[in-house]
Image (cartoon, helix red, strand yellow):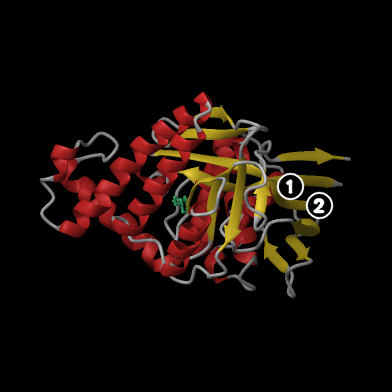
Amino acid sequence: MIRAVAPGRVNLIGDHTDYLGGLVLPMAIHLGTTVEGTPGGETVSLTSADEAVPATVPLDVEDPATVEPGWARYVAGVVAEVRPTTGFTGTVSTTLPIGGGLSSSAALEVAVALALGFEGTPLELAEACQRAEQRASGVPSGIMDQLASAAGVEGAALLIDCRSMEVRPVAVPDDIEIVVVDSGEARTLVGSAYAERRGQAEMAESVIGPLRDATTLDLKKLQDPVTAARARHVMTENARVWAFAEALSQGWPAEAGALMAASHASLRDDYEVSTPTLDALVGRLSATPGVYGARLTGAGFGGCVVALTEPGALTEGWKVRPAAAAQVATS
Ligand code: GLA
């Protein structure tokens, strides 16, 4: 029997920067997905307590995006990347809200890859699962979610440089809480709008070079105000990630909270990936006594908000703790 467990993630700061070689600061969380089963047979066959129809994927699957039901596409994407020589029969269970912005799909991919016998470094595991996600969803997503799940460190957030792929743990102090609140708004636009934003940022890079290295003077070379705003978000967000990592490790929660507020404003005004519902939720949480700061987390267009708080300040949402990386056990 093989048992693979992979955590979900919450991103504390640094959104829409990973696919531009920028900086992100996610953490793996104690909620996650488990795949349990036995190798053998000609297909990868998984049942899930949360899904009516099981996933049955042939080992030579060609186009994961056309597989039914929808959740089986993520399994198929992994099968297409790992290409196991034998099948697998088992079950999937999760403590993550599915599609709720805590990277349930990345956790599923990483757990399936490990259950199918993937061998390699955490970065190689994350890269294979990123490609699986792109094959399954058609969205040109970055590496953050899969790498957070594959490289998590108990008690720490991960400062990831998405250019060098260096992962540096940043301890999360015991006297702060990280709370995730679901806006209840489904991320319906995420496919097309995500790709559009990425395209706009890449358009800016074609004029002024890597946004990671650009300066505010370079911004003036961007004639189109929308392109300039997209670039400004990425550049200022990278700077906020450094500052946030410093604030967290120095034990300055008020500074960290202020950076989260600035990140949300930038995602709302310059990158335009927030919604009125997310803005209202961030506003309400930020105004609650004991909350240092709050922001949308992940792609935006709905989904979840993350807040940094004094212990006990919020009584809603999930109180998440930084958790260890995905792992596999055989018995
Ligand atoms: C999604 C993607 C990530 C990242 C975030 C935005 O979660 O999967 O790669 O781009 O959006 O920061």
Q: Nearer the viewer, residue 251 or 23?
A: 251
Q: Amino acid at mark 2?
A: Glu
Looking at this rendering, what residue extends furthest in the right direction?
A: 331
List x then y, in percent, for residue 266.
33, 51
Vertical placement of residue 310 versus 80, above or below:
above
Q: Does residue 21 appear in this view?
A: no
Reading the image, the residue beneath label 2 is 36
**For mark 2, does the 10 Å Cα neighbourhood hold few (<14), some (14 to 19), or many (20 or more) residues?**
many
Q: Does residue 148 appear in this view?
A: yes
Residue 28: assigned label = none
Vertical placement of residue 55 versus 176, above or below:
below
Q: Are marks 1 and 2 in contact (CB under 8 Å)?
A: yes
Judged from the image, the secondary structure of the residue bearing numbered disc 2 is strand
List x then y, in percent, for residue 280.
46, 65
Q: Amino acid at mark 1?
A: Ala
Mark 1–mark 2 Cα distance, whole angstroms, equals 7 Å
Label 2 C-beta lies within 8 Å of the nearest ligand 1 atom? no
Q: Quadrant of residue 274?
A: bottom left
List x then y, in percent, for residue 264.
40, 52
Give the number of marks. Answer: 2
List x then y, in percent, for residue 86.
74, 51
Reading the image, the residue beneath label 1 is 115
